[in-house]
Image (cartoon, grey):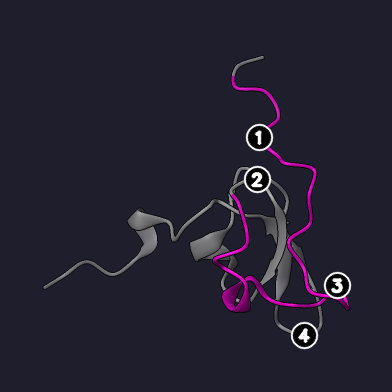
Amino acid sequence: MSGGDKTTGQACLGANNDTLVEDRQDQCKAGDAIATKHPAYLCDVNDAIADNDYHSAFCIYAGALKAERVKGKS
């Protein structure tokens, strides 16, 4: 097995377990379980992403915006 488990075992969520990472980005670390409205930009897409009726998703935080998905400078 190469790389192993990259999760932290922590959930970076608010007091009601519903805060989106967009409001807590400075407190979340790569590998944390997060809620986000932008999973393609913030999640490790090698892991499962659970969508819900609130147009947000729960997934593993990549630690930053995925550079390959962010619009480049023109």
Three-letter code, disc 3: Asn
Q: Is residue 68 above or below residue 41?
A: above
Instruction: Label 4, secondary structure: give it.
Output: loop
Decide: marks 2, 1 in contact (CB < 8 A)?
yes
Q: Which residues are magenta?
A: 3-29
Q: Is residue 71 left or right of residue 32?
A: left
Please identify the quarter of the rendering in which residue 42 is found.
bottom right
| N-terminal-most mark, 2 or 3 | 3
Decide: marks 3, 1 in contact (CB < 8 A)?
no
Q: Which residue is the site of mark 2?
A: 31
Instruction: Label 1, secondary structure: give it.
Output: loop
Q: Which residue is the site of mark 1?
A: 6
- Residue drawn at x 55%, y 51% as measured from the top left: 62
Quadrant position of the C terminus in the picture: bottom left
Label number found at residue 54: 4
Q: Which residue is the site of mark 3?
A: 17
Three-letter code, disc 1: Lys
